Image (cartoon, coloured by chain):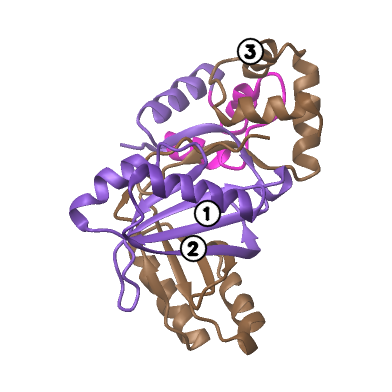
Amino acid sequence: MLDVKDRQLLEYVQLGLPICPRPYAEIGRLCDMPETEVIERLTRLKQQGLIKRMGVIVKHRQLGYRANAMIVWNVPDNLIKQLGGHISRFSFVTLCYQRPRQPEWPYNLYCMIHGKDRVTVLNQLEQLVDACGLSGFDKEILFSNRCFKQRGAIYQNPTPALADG
Amino acid sequence: MDEIDKQIINTLQDGFPICDAPYRQVAAQLGLTEQELIARLKTLLDNGTLTRFGPLYNAEQMGGALTLAAVKAPQERYDEITEIINAFPEVAHNYARSHELNMWFVIATETPEQIQQTIDAIERQSGLTVYNMPKNKEYFVNLKLEA
């Protein structure tokens, strides 16, 4: 699906878009491609879903989002799709995943809430539990204390840039 | 960061046009000049409010692989374990969390096989068991933090 030129383009773009009036022309200059071709290829890669989105990646702590909770639930497998769909519709939920259970770790549904402080996050969680009917399921709330490392993944050979966990 | 910066951040989290003069288009939408938007964006990147400005790739579609992993790091070895794990270029994020499983990190590699190799290497170097929690399914969320 990706040809050599796509890969080359993605490699340049992943470092960040140039901040100048004609950013795609600038990328084209770097990888020897006309501006129109850069725009066509990027548009297609976005339509195909390889580029999830273009835009800014924020540092949530810098925006005052100091509380970040990962909430894990143990829900019945036959309800997980419905519950995951419901949870992900709340605007304060920033990530929602189904993951396999582990030995001594029975949780299979994960979501993340980023908030300005813990009280706000806990209130939002309560709202979520009520609205989605989650009160009967085991859960754990894991607040983050420190962030040691946060970066987009950079590879030599193109390459995912990650949403922040 | 003033109200205009907040508007810029909120708008650009919704996406960025792919066209010949994208900054001009976004600036018009925000009632700014192209030069003003460019200057403000540069400042927000320079002062660290924004980490990156560009594309967010779909790792799996790129042939790459991602997983979430965690370890139970004993308190007395916490800093040492942090150093070991962060030294891996495959580790993209790493967070301390309040739980017995107290260190949670994302591993991103170019191929699925390299995930297991990285986990094995972390286990060897740390002497800890790595809990591997790859995603089975992602539920779509509109990832956006109001500035």
What chain does badge 3 belong to? Answer: B
Q: Is residue B145 visible?
A: yes
> Which of A42 and A28 lies nearest the eye of the viewer?
A42
Q: Secondary structure at mark 3?
A: helix
Amino acid at the residue labelled 2:
Ile
Residue A159 visible at all: no
* Count of numbered marks: 3
Seen as rendered, the residue at the extreme left is A78
Q: Please name which of the two marks, 1 or 3, marks the residue nearer to the observer.
A: 1
Which colour represents chain A?
purple
In what element is the residue under mark 2?
strand
The residue closer to the viewer here, A84 or B24, is: A84
Magenta range:
A5-33
From the viewer's perspective, tell me whether residue A111 is left or right of residue B80: left
Which element carries disc 1, helix, strand or loop? Answer: loop
Tell me the subunit letter for badge 2: A
Q: Residues within 10 Å of mark 1 (few under 14, many from 20)?
A: some
- Residue at horizontal 21%, vertical 57%? A77
Q: To which residue does mark 1 refer?
A: A165
Disc 3 with disc 2 on a shared chain: no
Residue that label 2 marks: A141
Amino acid type shown at disc 3 = Gln
> Badge 2 local density, few (<14 within 10 Å), some, or many (20+)?
some
Q: Can you tell which mark lies on residue B25?
A: 3
Mark 2 or 1, nearer chain start: 2
Q: Chain of mark 1?
A: A
Is residue A8 magenta-colored?
Answer: yes
Residue depicted at 28% across the width and 58% down the height? A75
Label 1, label 3: how many angstroms apart (C-alpha)?
31 Å
